[in-house]
Image (tube, rainbow, N blue to C red):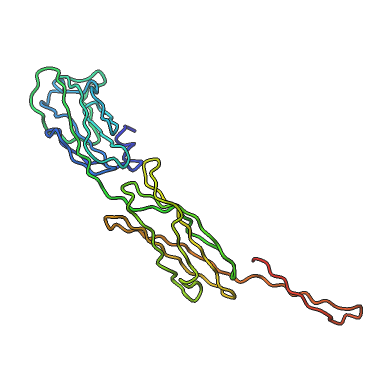
Amino acid sequence: MNLISRLIFVGVAFVINSADAKTFTIDEDTSSVHSLDEESGDFQTLKHISEIVNWPENGTVFVTEPHTVIYVPEPNFCGSDSLSYRVEPGPSDDDSIDPPTPPISIMSTFGSFPSTYTETVSYNVRCINDPVLLSISGLLNLQSGSSKTIHFYASDVDSSNFSVALQGSTNDSVLHADNLQLTQVSQIYYENGKYIAQWKLQVEAPSDTAGHTTIQLRTSDGEGLSKHYSIDVSLRRPKRTIFIHTDLLGSPVAETTSSEDN
Protein backbone atom coordinates (compact mmCIF):
# COMPACT_ATOMS: atom_id res chain seq x y z
CA MET A 1 0.00 0.00 0.00
CA ASN A 2 1.54 3.32 -1.05
CA LEU A 3 1.83 6.33 1.26
CA ILE A 4 -1.19 8.24 -0.03
CA SER A 5 -3.38 5.15 0.27
CA ARG A 6 -2.14 4.57 3.83
CA LEU A 7 -2.89 8.16 4.81
CA ILE A 8 -6.37 7.96 3.31
CA PHE A 9 -6.95 4.65 5.10
CA VAL A 10 -6.25 6.20 8.53
CA GLY A 11 -8.56 9.13 7.83
CA VAL A 12 -6.22 12.01 6.94
CA ALA A 13 -8.15 14.74 5.09
CA PHE A 14 -6.70 15.93 1.79
CA VAL A 15 -7.11 18.94 -0.49
CA ILE A 16 -5.98 18.14 -4.03
CA ASN A 17 -4.17 21.07 -5.68
CA SER A 18 -2.62 21.76 -9.06
CA ALA A 19 1.03 22.66 -9.29
CA ASP A 20 0.45 25.67 -11.55
CA ALA A 21 -0.11 27.80 -8.46
CA LYS A 22 2.73 28.37 -6.03
CA THR A 23 0.44 29.20 -3.12
CA PHE A 24 -2.18 26.80 -1.80
CA THR A 25 -4.90 27.59 0.73
CA ILE A 26 -6.11 24.79 3.00
CA ASP A 27 -8.00 24.49 6.26
CA GLU A 28 -6.46 23.69 9.62
CA ASP A 29 -5.87 19.93 10.12
CA THR A 30 -6.25 19.31 6.36
CA SER A 31 -3.42 18.06 4.15
CA SER A 32 -2.54 19.27 0.65
CA VAL A 33 -1.54 17.09 -2.31
CA HIS A 34 -0.20 18.27 -5.67
CA SER A 35 1.71 16.67 -8.54
CA LEU A 36 4.27 17.84 -11.08
CA ASP A 37 3.02 18.05 -14.66
CA GLU A 38 3.85 15.65 -17.42
CA GLU A 39 4.97 17.87 -20.31
CA SER A 40 5.09 15.08 -22.83
CA GLY A 41 3.65 11.68 -23.43
CA ASP A 42 7.20 10.41 -23.75
CA PHE A 43 8.06 8.90 -20.39
CA GLN A 44 11.73 9.83 -20.79
CA THR A 45 10.87 13.55 -20.54
CA LEU A 46 9.13 13.36 -17.18
CA LYS A 47 10.23 15.67 -14.38
CA HIS A 48 10.78 14.39 -10.89
CA ILE A 49 11.52 15.77 -7.42
CA SER A 50 15.03 14.82 -6.42
CA GLU A 51 15.13 16.28 -2.89
CA ILE A 52 13.54 18.63 -0.39
CA VAL A 53 15.70 21.75 -0.15
CA ASN A 54 13.85 23.62 2.62
CA TRP A 55 11.49 21.75 4.92
CA PRO A 56 8.32 23.42 6.27
CA GLU A 57 8.56 24.89 9.77
CA ASN A 58 5.02 23.97 10.84
CA GLY A 59 4.34 20.71 9.10
CA THR A 60 5.66 17.59 7.41
CA VAL A 61 6.16 16.87 3.72
CA PHE A 62 6.17 13.56 1.86
CA VAL A 63 7.23 12.97 -1.74
CA THR A 64 5.74 9.95 -3.50
CA GLU A 65 5.80 8.36 -6.92
CA PRO A 66 8.20 10.63 -7.06
CA HIS A 67 6.12 13.37 -8.65
CA THR A 68 3.58 13.99 -5.88
CA VAL A 69 4.02 16.28 -2.86
CA ILE A 70 1.97 15.84 0.33
CA TYR A 71 2.07 18.65 2.90
CA VAL A 72 0.66 17.84 6.35
CA PRO A 73 0.41 20.81 8.77
CA GLU A 74 0.95 20.26 12.47
CA PRO A 75 -2.22 19.63 14.49
CA ASN A 76 -4.16 22.83 15.23
CA PHE A 77 -1.62 24.96 13.30
CA CYS A 78 -2.93 27.85 11.22
CA GLY A 79 -0.93 30.53 9.43
CA SER A 80 1.72 30.58 6.70
CA ASP A 81 4.21 27.86 5.84
CA SER A 82 6.38 26.98 2.86
CA LEU A 83 8.72 24.38 1.45
CA SER A 84 11.20 24.13 -1.43
CA TYR A 85 12.18 21.14 -3.52
CA ARG A 86 14.57 20.50 -6.39
CA VAL A 87 13.10 19.36 -9.69
CA GLU A 88 15.14 17.52 -12.31
CA PRO A 89 14.16 16.53 -15.87
CA GLY A 90 13.57 12.95 -16.85
CA PRO A 91 12.50 9.93 -14.79
CA SER A 92 13.94 9.27 -11.37
CA ASP A 93 16.01 6.24 -10.49
CA ASP A 94 12.91 4.74 -8.89
CA ASP A 95 10.85 4.92 -12.12
CA SER A 96 10.35 1.63 -13.92
CA ILE A 97 10.04 1.07 -17.65
CA ASP A 98 6.36 1.91 -17.56
CA PRO A 99 5.35 5.31 -16.15
CA PRO A 100 3.97 5.16 -12.60
CA THR A 101 0.28 5.82 -12.03
CA PRO A 102 -0.20 7.90 -8.86
CA PRO A 103 -3.40 7.17 -6.90
CA ILE A 104 -4.12 10.90 -6.99
CA SER A 105 -2.75 12.79 -9.99
CA ILE A 106 -3.80 16.34 -10.72
CA MET A 107 -1.64 17.57 -13.56
CA SER A 108 -0.81 21.16 -14.54
CA THR A 109 2.35 23.15 -15.15
CA PHE A 110 4.80 25.56 -13.57
CA GLY A 111 6.21 26.19 -17.07
CA SER A 112 8.95 24.63 -19.16
CA PHE A 113 12.33 24.15 -17.51
CA PRO A 114 15.13 22.62 -19.59
CA SER A 115 17.32 21.80 -16.57
CA THR A 116 17.31 21.35 -12.82
CA TYR A 117 15.54 24.06 -10.84
CA THR A 118 14.25 24.73 -7.32
CA GLU A 119 10.56 25.40 -6.74
CA THR A 120 9.11 27.04 -3.60
CA VAL A 121 5.50 26.35 -2.62
CA SER A 122 3.66 28.40 0.01
CA TYR A 123 0.68 27.33 2.10
CA ASN A 124 -1.97 29.48 3.76
CA VAL A 125 -3.51 27.35 6.49
CA ARG A 126 -6.83 28.85 7.55
CA CYS A 127 -7.81 28.70 11.21
CA ILE A 128 -10.84 26.56 12.02
CA ASN A 129 -12.48 27.21 15.38
CA ASP A 130 -12.45 24.09 17.55
CA PRO A 131 -15.05 23.42 20.27
CA VAL A 132 -14.27 23.39 23.97
CA LEU A 133 -13.71 19.80 25.13
CA LEU A 134 -14.58 18.21 28.48
CA SER A 135 -12.78 15.26 30.07
CA ILE A 136 -15.76 13.84 31.92
CA SER A 137 -17.44 10.47 32.22
CA GLY A 138 -20.84 10.06 30.64
CA LEU A 139 -22.16 7.67 33.32
CA LEU A 140 -23.01 8.17 37.00
CA ASN A 141 -24.52 5.67 39.45
CA LEU A 142 -25.92 7.07 42.69
CA GLN A 143 -27.82 5.86 45.73
CA SER A 144 -30.70 8.02 46.85
CA GLY A 145 -29.76 10.27 49.74
CA SER A 146 -26.05 10.25 48.78
CA SER A 147 -23.84 12.88 47.16
CA LYS A 148 -21.10 12.85 44.55
CA THR A 149 -18.51 15.43 43.45
CA ILE A 150 -17.21 15.03 39.90
CA HIS A 151 -13.93 16.75 39.02
CA PHE A 152 -13.19 17.31 35.34
CA TYR A 153 -11.20 19.50 32.94
CA ALA A 154 -12.31 21.80 30.14
CA SER A 155 -9.85 22.67 27.36
CA ASP A 156 -9.67 24.74 24.17
CA VAL A 157 -6.82 24.82 21.64
CA ASP A 158 -7.83 28.20 20.22
CA SER A 159 -8.47 30.62 23.08
CA SER A 160 -8.63 31.13 26.82
CA ASN A 161 -12.05 32.74 26.41
CA PHE A 162 -14.39 29.83 27.13
CA SER A 163 -16.96 28.72 29.68
CA VAL A 164 -18.91 25.70 30.91
CA ALA A 165 -22.61 25.97 31.81
CA LEU A 166 -25.00 23.62 33.61
CA GLN A 167 -28.27 23.23 31.73
CA GLY A 168 -29.98 20.99 34.27
CA SER A 169 -31.57 17.56 34.39
CA THR A 170 -33.91 16.01 31.83
CA ASN A 171 -36.07 14.46 34.60
CA ASP A 172 -36.69 16.83 37.51
CA SER A 173 -38.76 14.22 39.36
CA VAL A 174 -35.61 12.09 39.72
CA LEU A 175 -32.95 14.80 40.03
CA HIS A 176 -33.90 18.46 40.15
CA ALA A 177 -31.61 21.26 39.02
CA ASP A 178 -31.52 22.49 42.63
CA ASN A 179 -29.59 19.33 43.47
CA LEU A 180 -26.80 20.23 41.04
CA GLN A 181 -24.02 22.78 41.42
CA LEU A 182 -21.26 23.55 38.90
CA THR A 183 -18.14 25.43 40.07
CA GLN A 184 -14.92 26.47 38.34
CA VAL A 185 -12.09 25.55 40.72
CA SER A 186 -9.03 26.81 38.82
CA GLN A 187 -8.01 29.68 36.60
CA ILE A 188 -7.54 29.00 32.91
CA TYR A 189 -3.90 28.17 32.14
CA TYR A 190 -1.91 27.17 29.04
CA GLU A 191 -0.29 23.73 28.87
CA ASN A 192 0.73 21.34 26.09
CA GLY A 193 -0.74 23.49 23.33
CA LYS A 194 -4.15 24.16 24.86
CA TYR A 195 -5.95 26.29 27.44
CA ILE A 196 -7.21 24.30 30.43
CA ALA A 197 -9.33 24.86 33.53
CA GLN A 198 -10.64 22.50 36.20
CA TRP A 199 -14.30 22.34 37.21
CA LYS A 200 -16.38 20.33 39.65
CA LEU A 201 -19.98 19.19 39.53
CA GLN A 202 -21.69 18.46 42.85
CA VAL A 203 -24.67 16.12 42.75
CA GLU A 204 -27.00 15.72 45.76
CA ALA A 205 -29.34 12.79 45.27
CA PRO A 206 -32.73 13.23 47.00
CA SER A 207 -33.89 10.62 49.50
CA ASP A 208 -36.38 7.89 48.61
CA THR A 209 -36.12 8.58 44.89
CA ALA A 210 -35.08 6.21 42.12
CA GLY A 211 -34.97 6.37 38.35
CA HIS A 212 -32.95 7.62 35.42
CA THR A 213 -32.13 11.10 34.16
CA THR A 214 -29.51 12.96 32.17
CA ILE A 215 -27.43 15.89 33.39
CA GLN A 216 -26.74 18.31 30.54
CA LEU A 217 -23.69 20.58 30.22
CA ARG A 218 -22.77 23.07 27.49
CA THR A 219 -19.39 24.55 26.59
CA SER A 220 -19.01 27.85 24.74
CA ASP A 221 -16.09 29.84 23.39
CA GLY A 222 -15.60 33.50 22.58
CA GLU A 223 -16.77 33.04 18.98
CA GLY A 224 -20.09 31.54 19.99
CA LEU A 225 -19.27 27.92 19.19
CA SER A 226 -21.08 25.56 21.58
CA LYS A 227 -20.82 21.85 22.29
CA HIS A 228 -23.22 19.81 24.43
CA TYR A 229 -22.28 17.05 26.87
CA SER A 230 -24.49 14.68 28.83
CA ILE A 231 -24.12 12.45 31.88
CA ASP A 232 -26.53 9.55 32.20
CA VAL A 233 -27.52 9.15 35.86
CA SER A 234 -28.94 6.00 37.43
CA LEU A 235 -30.43 6.73 40.87
CA ARG A 236 -31.42 3.77 43.04
CA ARG A 237 -32.84 3.28 46.49
CA PRO A 238 -30.68 1.49 49.07
CA LYS A 239 -31.33 -2.19 49.74
CA ARG A 240 -32.97 -2.70 53.15
CA THR A 241 -32.78 -5.88 55.21
CA ILE A 242 -35.10 -6.38 58.20
CA PHE A 243 -33.98 -8.64 61.06
CA ILE A 244 -36.57 -10.09 63.47
CA HIS A 245 -35.16 -10.96 66.89
CA THR A 246 -37.00 -13.60 68.94
CA ASP A 247 -36.81 -15.02 72.45
CA LEU A 248 -36.21 -18.64 73.32
CA LEU A 249 -39.84 -19.46 72.64
CA GLY A 250 -39.70 -17.91 69.14
CA SER A 251 -41.71 -14.86 69.97
CA PRO A 252 -40.52 -11.62 68.27
CA VAL A 253 -38.98 -9.22 70.74
CA ALA A 254 -37.15 -6.71 68.49
CA GLU A 255 -36.68 -5.58 64.90
CA THR A 256 -33.64 -3.94 63.25
CA THR A 257 -33.08 -2.66 59.72
CA SER A 258 -29.84 -2.29 57.80
CA SER A 259 -29.21 -0.57 54.43
CA GLU A 260 -26.61 -1.29 51.76
CA ASP A 261 -25.98 -0.54 48.11
CA ASN A 262 -27.55 -2.70 45.46
- In the image, residue 135 above or below residue 245: above
Left or right, 158 with respect to 209, comes to: left
Question: Could you tell me residue 12's position as x and y percent?
Answer: 31, 41
Left or right, 135 with respect to 106, comes to: right
Q: Residue at x 31, y 32 (%)?
A: 3
Question: Could you tell me residue 178's position as x and y percent?
Answer: 47, 72
In which quadrant of the rendered image does the C terminus lie? bottom right
Residue 177 sits in which quadrant?
bottom left
Q: Residue at x 29, y 32 (%)?
A: 60
Residue 251 sits in which quadrant?
bottom right
In which quadrant of the rendered image does the N terminus lie? top left
Question: Could you tell me residue 123's position as x and y percent?
Answer: 20, 36
- In the image, residue 211 above or below residue 17: below
Q: Nearer the viewer, residue 54 or 103?
A: 54
Q: Nearer the viewer, residue 220 or 235?
A: 220
**Extreme residue in the bottom direction:** 251
Q: Nearer the viewer, residue 148 or 112?
A: 148
Left or right, 216 with respect to 58, comes to: right
Q: Residue at x 50, y 55 (%)?
A: 151
Q: Residue at x 24, y 45 (%)?
A: 127
Left or right, 111 with respect to 262, comes to: left
**Extreme residue in the right direction:** 248
Residue 247 sits in which quadrant?
bottom right
